[in-house]
Image: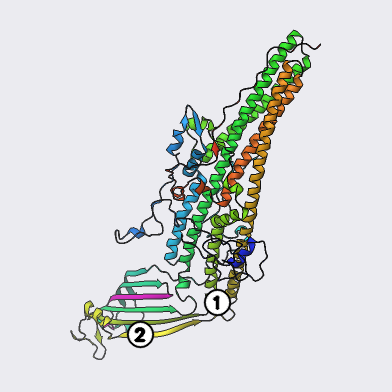
Amino acid sequence: MKRIDLKAAATIGLVLIGSTPQQGFTQQATPPATPPASSSSAGLTADGLPQAPEPKLTEPLFLRSTARDYTKPKSHFTNPIAPYTAISVPMPRLANSSQLDSLLRDGKIYLSLSDAIALALENNYDIAIARINLDIADTDLLRARAGSTLRGVSTGIVANTLGGTTSTITGGGGPGGTSSSAGGGGTGASGLVLSTNGGGPLPENLDPTLTSQLEYEPTSQKQANTLFSGGLTVLNTNTSTYNFGYTQGFITGTQLAVTFNNSRVTTNNPFSNYSPDITSSFRATATQHLLQGFGWGVNGRFILQAKNDRRITDSSFRQQVLYTVNQVENIYWGLVSAYEDVQAKERALGQSTQLTSDNRKQLEIGTLAPLDVVNSDSTVATDKQALIVSQTNLEYQQLIMKQAIARTLNDPALSAAPVIPTDRVGLDRLPEEDTPVEDLVRQAYVNNPQIEQAILNMKNNEITIKAEKNGLLPTVDAYAFYGASALGGAQSANALNFNTGKPYDPGTFPSIGYGTVLKDLFNSSAPDKGVGVNITIPLRNRTAQADQARSQMEYRQSQMRLQQIYTQIRIQVINAQFALTNDRAQVMAAQAAHDFANQSLDAEQKKYKLGASTTANVLQQGRNLATSENNLLSATAAYAKDRAALQQLLSTTLDHYSISIESAATGDIAKAPVIPGLTAPKAPEAPKPISSTPPPPPQ
């Protein structure tokens, strides 16, 4: 397993024991490969404090959402014009995966938790949107390798899926949105300032550039003074220009510029000895930054930052998958609660309806007062209203479940199909409930993607600090050039010898062809060479000083933010384990209360049958049973949700459920998740019958 060096681990270790740092961050400290035991002296910092365990990278490092690698450009070799053609990004899939259709039977969707998670990995838009960020980050790496600045990529959690936080319509559960950018391309997230990210001297353009100028210009110019034009009133000049240039930057801070210029001029000017006049020149200039912009560290820093940002995007995608899987679990357990609540409300209505029917029979024979019938009728109306609310809530939960696991609900059969949950939460103890809290905290430190992202962001901060420090230096550029020029052509027929006032004799100026011109250009017959230094010294240098200090301050912020994340995760893990313990106790208590209410109702019905009870008492026991059923459903759902939340916090959900992060990155889930701790649903209880035999009249 490849790991990241954890800078400032000594101070971060202070968080593990709740201390306050005294000396700032130790820059050279490197954590051990595995968490040291707190009782051992191994793996301690210079202050004798235990180090934080080293976070592991999201594996594999460079996840791909498509088969194409966007870090690699189109090549000239297979197609010379390929780099100048557009890259075609495939259209996203907007239809549902085939697995969803296979779950539709007899007009109903029978959905297990494993199916729900698999469908979410394939179809959920939040994951699909985050998946594209993997390729967007690749384009930044492609830019960086060309020497360009980074555009950044959002690594915030996408939270546009409805539900997952509430279980009722009135509670809300509306869509959120993408949280503020964090990580490689973020600015201002979590109170941090990242304004200097990418600052410092701009790197050289590492992509070579070829320029050319091809021009033909015929010119006719009237002369105001014929003395200087050999008596001509109009000078005709035809100029052909063929200029070429090549520029190449290098990661060492070197720039090479080569120019090759050619011109061919024909004219009727008697002062010109050659027509056509062929002139050719070239110059090669090499410039090297000696202070500011020197070396591969400054010029190649964007490549390192882009790689870090790419890893941050991988980690953010894993965080998105963990978040969405947890959200789907919450939606599923909300659906289970709503489904069982409808069954409980139906049982309650059946009991109250049957009791009302019996009461009316007793009223007809004169063994019951009319007020008892009114009381039971009121209970029936209340139970009907409660059932309608429960059924509406179930329909809503079914709807938000479908929008979480489907890409489109335009299919009428799918849209109208009720969702039947086929799993229930088991109450077998999980290992996390009995694991010592310190072990859970260390497990979260190793696996949590927030820590991984924070450390990678600190690495980017360190790169920026070095760049801003380099930006404080004066600009000192050494350069050297070598070039030459050559002349050729044919004797002009209009060339005039002003000593004799007659044209030159043919052959006075020998003809020189372009081949000879090129030969003279490179045989150093007319060289042009030199060396020099360009120096630019900003006398007060205030802008560079401000940026350099600012980059240090931003790094200090990121150090404290990392400490804060460790502290927050510690508290969240402890609270989550407490919540799970309390939830289990709540379920046990709710189950006992439900059993008692069930037995009390049964006893009250038997007493009513014998004339030893009243309608009001039976109805009250029925309401007590309904309340206990609601409490049991709520307690069970809270236990299931908090159990999933703890696994999300520990970032072990994917491992526990056998979910491949590579499959999640492609959206092709070949193997269904394996969800432990589930059980099959119990058969719904039939309403307890009340004997139609009226109780004996009171004596």
User: Where is residue 512 shown, x and y percent of the image?
Assistant: 21, 81
Q: Nearer the viewer, residue 60 or 218?
A: 60
Could you give the CA–CA distance between mark 1 and mark 2, rounded to whole angstroms? Answer: 32 Å
Residue under numbered circle 2: 529
Query: What mark, if any, has residue 472 been given in the picture?
Result: 1
Is residue 562 visible in the rendered image? The answer is yes
Percent x, y of residue 652 = 53, 50
Magenta range? 251-272
Answer left or right for 119 relative to 39.
Answer: left
Is residue 384 depicted above or below 242 in this figure?
Answer: above
What secondary structure prevails in the magenta region?
Answer: strand
Amino acid on which disc 1 is placed: Leu
| Residue 460, magenta (yes or no) | no
Would you identify the image quadrant in which residue 82 lies?
Answer: bottom left
Q: Quadrant of residue 368?
A: top right
**How many residues crowd around disc 1 within 10 Å: few (fewer than 14), some, or many (20 or more)?**
many
